[in-house]
Amino acid sequence: MVRDYPRPRIVISRCIEFDPCRYDGSKIPSPTVVRLKAHADCMPVCPEVEIGLGIPRATVRIVRIDGVDHLIQPATGRDVTSEMTGFASRFLDSLPPVDGFVLKGGSPTSGASGVRVYPSAEKSQAIERTAGFFAREVLKRFPGLPIEDELRLNNARIRDHFLTGIFTLAAFRAIENQQDREPLVQFHAANKYLLMACHQQLMREMGRLVASRAKTEKEELYARYRRMLCAALAQVPRYTNNINVLHHTMGYFSNRVSGEEKAYCLRLIDRYRDGHATLAEPRDLLRSWVIRFQEPGLLDQTFFAPYPVELADLPEDITDRGRDVWKSRNAPNAREKPGTFKKG
Ligand code: SF4
């Protein structure tokens, strides 16, 4: 059950783990992006540097004037709206097919949501929240692609959803280039349970489309399948769908595992249902059964491993794993050497 993962192609804000190109010359940390670099083809971009604002630079903000948003640098009074929209168009027009975006949250240029809009370039209260100028063009041109910011990727469920999306789309892009009908049959079969967990109705429609492949022009076939695939992957994952798939796949082993093993698996599913465990707990147990019994109906199912396992681990600085908690707890009075204990 070892999968080869085509490398997703993703556009990333350059200040996230690539270059210290923020207005103050800093760089943004992101454990997910650090790990992604080894598994994805990243295309870093800093629109503010590209339009010549330099590093360091005075900050820009979105200012709404007579109902129209402008990108303004209050310290200099410069209005860089047309430079920014021009750059965004040229850059996005020149992109090869991509599978997703990781954009710097909160930036008036790159933030995909929640960016403050001001009524004036002077000191004032924000009147609305929206997307940054570069991000608006991204959202307009790539409505079906996974687009996240680096902070949201620190959340395990959001990260799982994003990674599932970009790796599934990269695998689809690999067969899309061939434009043969048969690889699409295999792709759909291998993603059956993953799509069932995303959106059952779309999964069935996609199945009907694949079944009618001989009657559909290849280009039309792939274009329609891509639209449905993007729509299915964009769904906010519902835990009830995942539980359905877990129960369904558990049925493959009903006569092959002991009552005690089944009860343990059900307990993990309940833990996931109650929010005490991530999907990975019951899914990994079922995956171990797939491997143990070499179950042909499930061996190629992407549901069990939608992206490389190295990306599935929680980043160390989000959990406590990267921190020496003993050392930090004892730090103020740390007289003992590691491994020694106080009595009593
Ligand atoms: S948020 Fe965007 S514009 Fe700002 S430094 Fe990062 S990449 Fe450049």
Image: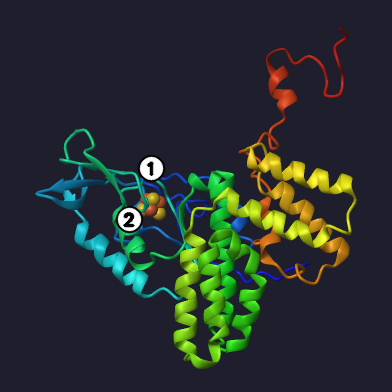
Direction from residue 321 to residue 11 in the image, left or right: left
The three-letter code of the residue at mark 2 reads: Glu
Residue at 48 percent across and 75 percent down: it is 226
Q: Does the residue labelled 1 lie within 8 Å of ligand 1?
A: no
Q: Residues within 10 Å of mark 2 (few under 14, many from 20)?
A: many
Q: Name the residue under label 2.
A: 48
Q: In this view, does 56 lie above or below 39?
A: above
How far across and how far down the image is residue 252, in percent?
Answer: 79, 62
Direction from residue 48 to residue 161 in the image, left or right: right
Residue at 63 percent across and 69 percent down: it is 191
* Residue nearest the observer in this picture, 269 or 116: 269
Residue 332's disc is: none
How far across and how far down the image is residue 30, in percent?
Answer: 54, 47
Q: Is mark 2 within 8 Å of ligand 1?
A: yes
How far across and how far down the image is residue 275, in percent?
Answer: 62, 38
- Marker count (numbered): 2
* Colouring used for the render: rainbow
The three-letter code of the residue at mark 1 reads: Asp
Tell me, yes or no, if residue 71 can be seen here.
yes
In the picture, the quarter occupied by the N terminus is: bottom right
Residue at 76 percent across and 70 percent down: it is 297
Q: Residues within 10 Å of mark 1 (few under 14, many from 20)?
A: few
Q: Is mark 2 on a helix, strand or loop?
A: helix
Q: Quadrant of residue 332?
A: top right
Q: Mark 1 points at which residue?
A: 24
Which badge, 1 or 2, comes first in the chain's sequence? 1
* Residue nearest the observer in this picture, 32 or 238: 238
